Image: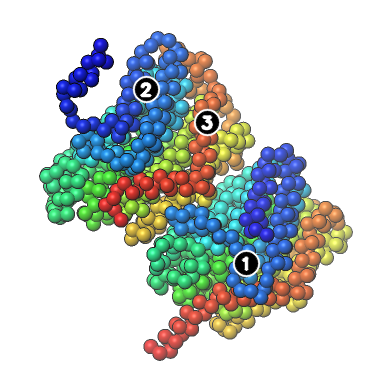
Amino acid sequence: MSALLLPIAQAKVSGPHIDWAGLSPLLALFGGATIVLLLGLFRARPVREVVVPFLAFASFGTAIGLGIWQLGRRVDLISGAMRSDELTIVLMFIFCAAGMAAVLLSWRGVAVREASHGEFYALMLTSAAGMYVLVAAQNLVALFLGLELLSIPLYVLCATEMRRETSLESGLKYLVIGSVGSATLLYGLAFIYGATGSTDYAGIAQKVGSVSNDTLLLTGIALTLAGMAFKASVAPFHQWTPDVYEGAPTSITAFMAVATKTAALGVMLRFFNVALLDVQGDWGPAIAALAAITIVVGNVGALGQSSLKRLMAWSSVAQAGYLLAGVVVATRLGVQATVFYLATYLFMNMAAFGVIVARERSTPFGDDIRSVAGLGAQQPLLAAALTLAMLGLAGIPATAGFIGKFYLIDAAISGDYTWLGVMIVIGSMVSLAYYLRVIAAVWMQSPEPADAVPVTTTGRPALAGGDEVADAPRAQPEVWVVALVFGAATLFFGIIPSPLFDLAVRAGSALGNLF
Amino acid sequence: VSLSIVLWLPFAAGLVGLLLPGALSRLVAIAGTGATLVLAVIVLVKFKASTGGLQFVTDETWIKELGIHYKLGIDGLNLFLIVLATVLFLASAIWASFTEWERPGLFFFWFGLAESGVLGALMAQDLALFVIFFDLMLVPFLFLTGSWGGEGRVPAIIKLFIYTLVGSLLMLAGAIATGVLAPGDNVTFVLSDLAQRRLSTGQQEWVFLFFAAAFLVKMPAFPLHGWMPDGYRAMPLPVLAVFSGILSKVAAYGFLRIVLPLYPDATVHFQELMLLISLASILYGSAMAFTTTNTRLILGYSSVAQLGFIVLGIFALRPEGAQGAVLQAVNHGLVVAPAFFIVWLLAARAGSEDLRDMGGIAFRAPVLAAMFLIVTFALLAMPGSSNFVGEFLILLGVFRAKIVFAFIAFAGVVMASYYALRMFIGAMHNRTGRTVTSREMSVRDGIVLVPLVVLIIGFALYPQIALFKGERAVRQTIAPAQQAAAASERAQVTP
């Protein structure tokens, strides 16, 4: 009946033009979230534990597929609130790939069981939809909408292992600090609107040159930058990162580390390199200073860590500093380098987190560095994946991370920020000290005896969500797949980087105003 | 012969060995390094000394967007170093197969990658490619030492790795700056193009310092050698032989291949600083070598001194000096690798690597003693040895360029004879050590040692081969720096 009525209704009411094709990746994410949420209500275990994660995985996959179909089109969506162009789509590839990996890493973990399967994956998909909105945003309202849509599900996801105190702490901390960040950002956006009288990027870009020394504008830029820096964990707005990363379920940590960073850097690229391009002289030195501080703080902070998740958290702070170099220079080369590095960052982080999850489930050490001691002798493949990830993050040749850093330094130097390029190099030197510690543990130490610590992750009573079968230490092929595939990608794109370069160049071409 | 095959053959052998059971992986590694040596010798024979420029060139665009080419080539500068590398790696592979390593497949995989890395750095004719191989060749040593090394290996190798990568990463920034800031439209890293479009003098100076940091750490030179004692103590001896024999030479080679042609103005500007550093290395290395009693470290500190000589020759900015430096780089590699093998033999007889525990080993081992004596004479640059020719040319070059530095450097020659003879006498003669059991070396040991000693003798009889084939390339590579030096002298005369 309704199928019959729909064409009639359409004939009567002429609504605004909607580019369904352009919106399709976003719809796939939202649609997936809805379906997954509803299917999660079924009582049958196979539906909740197999069909639901599969559909979540497929939704991310569909979004990527639709993105490939749309790659090359540049269209304004929802009367100019968002824009689907190469930059949006390539960044979406990165965070959807991170989403797919995170689904696999969560699949048979504790968090999904405690949070009920449907909700968990639905939140993840919604967060990814928020990222899409954020990087596609063309005006300040869409920007804020995207940011909140991204953040709120993540606050919940961090706390999904609800019987573990640190998980709750993580969620709460992220909520409080994230809200402060959002509020700061919103305040800044209001100032910018006040100074330029416009909420859309194009309008701001037109006006901003004429009000470049306006206090209102400068305050607005500073507050907005601080708000975005919270999300990208740029120092000195990074303090939440180690605690939140450590406490959150590891699959969610992996998702946050890669996807949130991609979205945050994506919105900075658009906001600063499009809307505020004419006042680069105002924000360029500020971001460059932040980048330098971030590189130092992140790398030094990581030095003493014995928890792998905390180590990755500090390392992600440092990497945010490297990535900012691509934003600072405001050139097409800078955009390309940032996008390229984000892609390599995806590979390296997912490989590392895959190994961390695998070891978390098969040793009693959780995410402590002892969990990977002697891995090289026991499971050489996993050890190789972790080694490649660490070498890549440190920027050793023959990994994608090296090419990424090369590209960023290249962009920094040709954008007249040679000193920032040297800062990246100095940061990499410091970072060797902690990445090598992991490699040394993997290959050059003997495994810790498993009875050295009391069992923590296994053997909880059923009342506390324990499940003897599910908690039993075992190898899980899907976790291995994530670690090995992304580890192999780190190596492959370090030797044959051309496919990634193609994507990065297309993403860079979307911002036509840059040279 | 395609250079790519020479370059990747050891790595391919290592990969194959990784998939095979232990005993086979050794054979594959030996076969791989042996085949590489054969190919390198074919290249040596086919190399035409009369034609200038690069030969056996392979040039492909690797990363279009960054302007990085996969360009390999051979000229008189790297020809003999490549042959040296393949010789030393083969000797070391045979030597390594005497020992039962845990997980031998993995050991020889890293070993093969190390050889490919070194050969790549020597063959690369693209600045970015050079930097990549220069960093990459260090990675296998991280694992070789960390997994199979001696006491205190993990802290030692991490120290070594960070030390050397600090330099290498600075070099990375310098290399990118060279490509990006060079005048011209498109970014390129091909060395021959970069030599045409030089940086301004101010840019050259900081880039020079970054490159010098990388090379001086790797050698190591005097104030930057902090990683050396711990690293040398921890590294397995067959690995140490190639590390000391060839990796340090890649750094010296880097000065000739990259720094002098690309940054001639800065080279002239920093000439005296570099000469001072090399003098300090000579004096410090020699003094340490005749006070320490650990035989590995005697060789380690003597390398510091020898590399000081090599840098001295390079920064004389005279053809004789640079030729002597190239010759001496080959000589030192040929001497130090058998010397480490002898240390291994001595340690097996004395039960320790400390000179104080040795003595009287020559008693029942005349052949070993004879071999050791030849190596010792070569090490101290006895007239008649090829090392003598090398040091003579270096000192001649410095004498003509900066006479004061030459006088001080002569002291190094004297000190070399002291520490080399002290080691020989202390180990082979004197009172027999308490734990020493003198016995002759086996035929198996001879397979490694004798060919190397024969090469030393052969090279002593006919050092011209390296000089002759290298002369044209050496003149070419120092020409820009010589011009810059002449220009700056003119500027000083007519202010």
| Position of residue A23 in the picture relative to residue A116 (left or right) | left
Q: CA distance from mark 2 to mark 1?
A: 62 Å
Q: Chain of mark 1?
A: B
Q: Nearer the viewer, residue A445 or A504?
A: A504
Q: Mark 3 highlights which residue?
A: A481
Where in the figure is residue A481, as x and y percent of width and height? 52, 31
Identity, as a three-letter code, of the amino acid under mark 1: Gln
Q: Chain of mark 3?
A: A
Q: Mark 2 highlights which residue?
A: A120
- In the current view of this chain or complex, which residue is farthest to the bottom? B494
Q: Nearer the viewer, residue B199 or B184?
A: B184
Element on which disc 3 rests: helix
In the picture shown, does residue B467 fall above or below A266?
below
Where in the figure is residue A240, as x and y percent of width and height? 33, 36
In the picture shown, does residue B367 fall above or below A438?
below
Camera-side mark, 2 or 3:
3
Q: Mark 1 highlights which residue?
A: B55
- Labels 2 and 3 touching (C-beta < 8 A): no
Q: CA distance from mark 2 to mark 3?
A: 21 Å
